[in-house]
């Protein structure tokens, strides 16, 4: 759903970044801001280097250089998309989500139903958690948890609970909360009795695993029996509901997204206990499927956080079949999948308990490319007969059709052709692919680079570097190539209102040469001129537009109010920065004019060059 800029600003103003970040790290007053240890899991530190400005509503870590605002924090730590972050913050501030422009009674009714279902699920999650807490130490569920080695921290993190054996334990609690039983049945928590009045609990005598949305709301449950029962499945999962669609949810993601982003890798496992066990062992960049194969929606979710995935499968035939099913999904999502099968039909939980987390980490680092893992399995007993080659090409054909990255597809083609002992053109034709540019041809010892006939590299545009359109990459304003003086200028100008007013009054903007830096400063100036009171929000606004937001934060001198702050020193630094930016601009201008003069001599250009040199001399004398 798209939100208007007015609504986004309203949501942003109704939430305090300090309150959000304080849930993950302790912040203490330091000068005009707050400091704490960095909450991002890939940055372990002993001394506080994470700065939060309550006034500007931005954060910056002087150690790992992560920077941003409310929305980027929720994205990087919790894996939320921008719309999910806006919705989460709106709900947190009790701000109603705006209705679509066209009134749709059916859509409004569906949205209201989802809110009610989420409330029922929250009541159920709290109930299951409370039942586990109340269970005596010698209760079978506590003994089971002890046998699996689950800590209280992990139990709390994942909201693990217990469904008591009684047929109506949850039903009675929901009745006491005035929850309509029809709604509870739609949430798939209770079921109407056959031929009798009343309802009974769907989950009974099971260890309960709540399934959370990206916004941390319980949307479904998985229950594991404590003792093997021949008539019941080992795991009982919630059927799909209006708030829970299995193909769009990965278990554990709300708890592990921050680790996936920081490690730039996602480990995919197949069950609740596998994920929880790995999380407790310190391998936390995991997600789990829930009794279903991976789906294209799963692939899209993963790509929002990383392109590097390792699919960890059980070592049995079912695990290998799951690996085969997942490969086209992961490739179609434009991910880089690796695969690992564990020995002796072990699952990840068994492996970690027997060999330890470090041993598994070593195996994960050695994990082969999933494409090659599957190809090698398909080629077991391969003799290279003509019919075998055709059959294998037929198996590969739908796989190659899913790969969007032409470069990756060409490399896989070359490797497969070499292993199959066929020519690359034959395999390309056999799998139904047209010639697509540079490829690697197989050789006896190594690959040799070959280029398709008549291919030409695009000619570089000598003026492209100065084109403002080149400053935007992937929807972000790029600061790549900005000079040190321009980067320092950004940080200093956004640091205080006085610095920004000096920048505007002295008209330094016209001397900023880098297209990206100039675009950012133009945007800041436009916002500031529209509303002078918006200066404090400038940095928070701009970090959403920049590819490297950390460059908007200057690390010296100290902030006003700190013991090390020196107003005179900062003023001198700002003046020097203005001077360097202008000097660089005049120098580059003189060079460009000299080049133009060679190709098209004119007295006018000569005078412009002389003026640029005079201005530089005057600037340096000052």
Image (cartoon, rainbow, N blue to C red):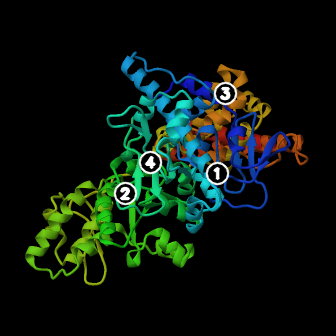
* Between marks 3 and 1 in the image, the one whose residue lies nearer the viewer: 1
Q: Earlier in the sequence, mark 4 or mark 2?
A: 2
Residue 319: x percent and y percent? 34, 67
Q: Earlier in the sequence, mark 1 or mark 2?
A: 1
Q: Secondary structure at mark 1?
A: helix
* Between marks 1 and 4 in the image, the one whose residue lies nearer the viewer: 1
| Mark 3 touches mark 1? (CB < 8 Å) | no
Q: Secondary structure at mark 4?
A: loop
Separation of residues labelled 4 and 2 (CA atoms): 67 Å
Relative vertical location of residue 450 with respect to residue 601 in this rendering, above or below: below
Q: Is residue 574 left or right of residue 479?
A: right
Any part of residue 82 in sight? no
Separation of residues labelled 1 and 4 (CA atoms): 69 Å
Residue 581: x percent and y percent? 69, 43
Residue 491: x percent and y percent? 71, 42
Relative vertical location of residue 27 with respect to residue 362 in this rendering, above or below: above
Relative vertical location of residue 293 with respect to residue 450 in this rendering, above or below: above
Quadrant (top left/top right/bottom left/bottom right) for the N terminus: top left
| Label disc, if present, on residue 13 of the rendered structure | 3
Separation of residues labelled 3 and 1 (CA atoms): 38 Å
Separation of residues labelled 1 and 2 (CA atoms): 25 Å
Which of 229 and 529 lies nearest the eye of the viewer? 229
Q: Please identify the residue farthest to the left as the structure is shown.
A: 387
Which of 386 and 570 lies nearest the eye of the viewer? 386
Residue labelled with disc 2: 233
* The quarter of the displayed image where residue 291 is located: bottom left
Q: Earlier in the sequence, mark 3 or mark 4?
A: 3
Residue labelled with disc 4: 462
Q: Earlier in the sequence, mark 2 or mark 3?
A: 3
| Label disc, if present, on residue 133 of the rendered structure | 1
| Mark 4 touches mark 2? (CB < 8 Å) | no
């Amino acid at each position: 759903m798209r939100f208007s800029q007015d609504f986004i600003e309203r949501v942003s103003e109704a939430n305090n970044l300090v309150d959000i970040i304080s849930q993950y790290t302790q912040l203490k007053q330091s000068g005009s801001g707050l400091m704490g240890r960095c909450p991002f899991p890939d940055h372990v530190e002993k001394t506080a280097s994470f700065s939060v400005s309550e006034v500007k509503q931005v954060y910056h870590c002087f150690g790992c250089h992560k920077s941003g605002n409310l929305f980027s924090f929720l994205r990087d730590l919790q894996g939320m998309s921008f719309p999910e972050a806006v919705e989460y913050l709106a709900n947190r501030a009790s701000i109603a989500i705006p209705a679509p422009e066209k009134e749709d009674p059916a859509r409004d009714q569906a949205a209201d139903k989802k809110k009610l279902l989420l409330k029922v699920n929250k009541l159920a999650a709290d109930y299951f958690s409370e039942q586990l807490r109340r269970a005596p130490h010698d209760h079978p569920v506590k003994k089971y948890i002890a046998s699996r080695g689950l800590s209280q921290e992990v139990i709390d993190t994942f909201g693990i609970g217990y469904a008591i054996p009684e047929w109506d334990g949850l039903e009675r609690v929901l009745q006491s909360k005035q929850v309509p039983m029809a709604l509870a049945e739609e949430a798939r928590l209770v079921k109407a009795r056959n031929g009798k009045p009343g309802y009974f609990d769907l989950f009974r005598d099971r260890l309960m695993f709540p399934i959370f949305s990206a916004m941390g709301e319980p949307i479904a449950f998985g229950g594991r029996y404590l003792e093997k029962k021949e008539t019941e499945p080992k795991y009982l999962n919630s059927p799909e509901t209006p708030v829970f669609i299995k193909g769009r949810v990965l278990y554990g993601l709300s708890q592990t997204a921050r680790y996936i982003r920081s490690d730039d890798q996602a480990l995919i496992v197949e069950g609740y206990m596998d994920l929880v066990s790995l999380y407790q062992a310190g391998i936390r960049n995991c997600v789990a499927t829930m009794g279903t194969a991976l789906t294209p929606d799963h692939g899209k979710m993963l790509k929002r956080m990383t392109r590097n995935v390792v699919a960890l499968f059980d070592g049995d035939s079912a695990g290998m079949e799951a690996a085969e099913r997942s490969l086209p999904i992961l490739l179609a999502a434009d991910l880089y999948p690796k695969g690992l099968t564990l020995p002796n039909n072990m699952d990840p939980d068994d492996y970690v308990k027997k060999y330890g987390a470090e041993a598994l980490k070593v195996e994960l680092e050695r994990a082969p490319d999933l494409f090659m893992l599957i190809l090698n399995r398909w080629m077991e007993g391969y003799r290279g007969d003509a019919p075998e080659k055709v059959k294998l090409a037929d198996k590969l054909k739908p796989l190659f059709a899913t790969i969007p990255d032409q470069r990756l597809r060409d490399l896989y083609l070359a490797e497969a052709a070499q292993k199959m002992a066929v020519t690359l053109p034959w395999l390309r034709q056999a799998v139904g692919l047209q010639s697509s540019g540079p490829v690697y041809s197989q050789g006896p010892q190594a690959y040799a680079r070959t280029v398709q006939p008549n291919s030409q590299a695009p000619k570089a545009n000598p003026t492209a570097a100065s084109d403002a359109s080149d400053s935007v990459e992937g929807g972000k304003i790029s600061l790549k190539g900005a000079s040190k003086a321009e980067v320092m200028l950004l940080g200093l100008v956004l640091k205080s209102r006085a610095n920004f007013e000096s920048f505007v009054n002295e008209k330094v903007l016209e001397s900023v040469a880098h297209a990206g830096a100039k675009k950012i400063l133009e945007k800041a100036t436009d916002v500031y001129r529209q509303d002078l009171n918006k200066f404090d929000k400038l940095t928070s606004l701009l970090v959403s537009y920049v590819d490297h937001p950390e460059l908007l934060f200057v690390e010296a001198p100290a902030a006003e109010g700190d013991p090390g702050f020196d107003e005179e020193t900062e003023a001198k630094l700002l003046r020097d920065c203005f001077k360097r930016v202008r000097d660089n601009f005049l120098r580059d201008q003189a060079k460009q004019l000299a080049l133009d003069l060679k190709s098209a001599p004119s007295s006018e250009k000569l005078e412009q060059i002389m003026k640029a040199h005079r201005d530089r001399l005057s600037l340096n004398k000052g």
